[in-house]
Amino acid sequence: MIEFINVSKKYDNNVRALSNVNINIDKGEFVFLIGASGAGKSTLVKLLLKETEPTSGRLFLKNKDITKVRNRQIPYIRRNIGVIFQDFRLLPKKTVYENVAFAMRIIGASNKEIRRQVPIILSLVGLSKKAGNYPNQLSGGEQQRVSIARALVNNPSVIIADEPTGNLDPDTAWEIMKLLRDINNRGTTVLMATHAKDIVNCMKRRVIALRGGRVIRDEQKGVYGDEI
């Protein structure tokens, strides 16, 4: 599903963000990506989203080499990936329904497809009754559920969750994690970058630890670890 082969990334200011990274994530896995700030987590995510390019190495998504693709191909690559952010990034002047529908409109979905799919996804994340609300009328947990619905609505193969619980209280954070677990159980691959030690230790999923741009640990049913 996702494969990094000897991937390195050095920025123009000579900061080396990743060094010879080799990672293989299978379809349907739930993987935690951990590491201190500056460890390389954000760069790894940006490479997957084609927001930056590796200095060397190769990167595969769904068995397709996406290392060097033309700019016009990037939107098609991104359709395979749903992204959930720590700060939600909702459109403040659009309702819950419109925020989720917007993700379908930008890939050219028909009005008929939107009317069919959006209610299904809102029901999945428990927001059917909030479809007409605006983001400022929602709690933090509800806003993150909208973000998850938006990431899911185009049926991506992979969900990338970048610190999705970082702005939430502990109880709400666990509600979001249960939702992500349910999504993963339906077959969607989940890659979650996080500093949430308790969540990582309780979930007992695969853990990939980065330090100084290198993979220092990759283990099934892993824990956060004191080396981070």
Image: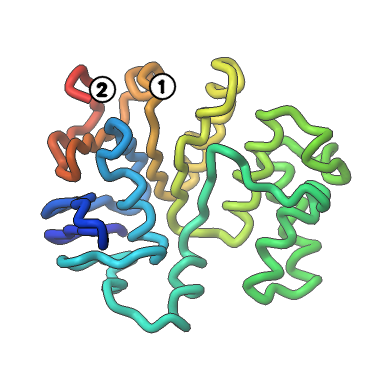
**Residue under numbered circle 1:** 199
Residue 197 figure quarter:
top left
Residue 118 figure quarter:
bottom right
> Which amino acid type is shown beneath numbered disc 1?
Ile
**Residue under numbered circle 2:** 223
- Residue visible at 44% across and 48% down? 160
Image spot of residue 126 (x, y percent) = 72, 35
- Residue visible at 31% across and 52% down? 44
- Residue visible at 80% across and 71% down? 111
In the displayed structure image, the side of residue 187 where residue 219 appears, left or right:
left
In the displayed structure image, the side of residue 124 where residue 85 appears, left or right:
left
> If the image is split into quadrants, where does the N terminus sit?
bottom left
Residue 129 figure quarter:
top right
Image spot of residue 212 (x, y percent) = 17, 40
Q: Of marks 2 and 1, which one's residue comes earlier in the chain?
A: 1
Q: Nearer the viewer, residue 109 or 215?
A: 215
Image spot of residue 209 (x, y percent) = 22, 35
In the displayed structure image, the side of residue 115 where residue 164 appears, left or right:
left
- Discs 2, 1 touching: Cβ within 8 Å: no
Figure check: 72 above or below 164:
below
> Which amino acid type is shown beneath numbered disc 2?
Val
CA gap between label 2 and label 1 equals 9 Å
> Which secondary structure lies at badge 2?
loop
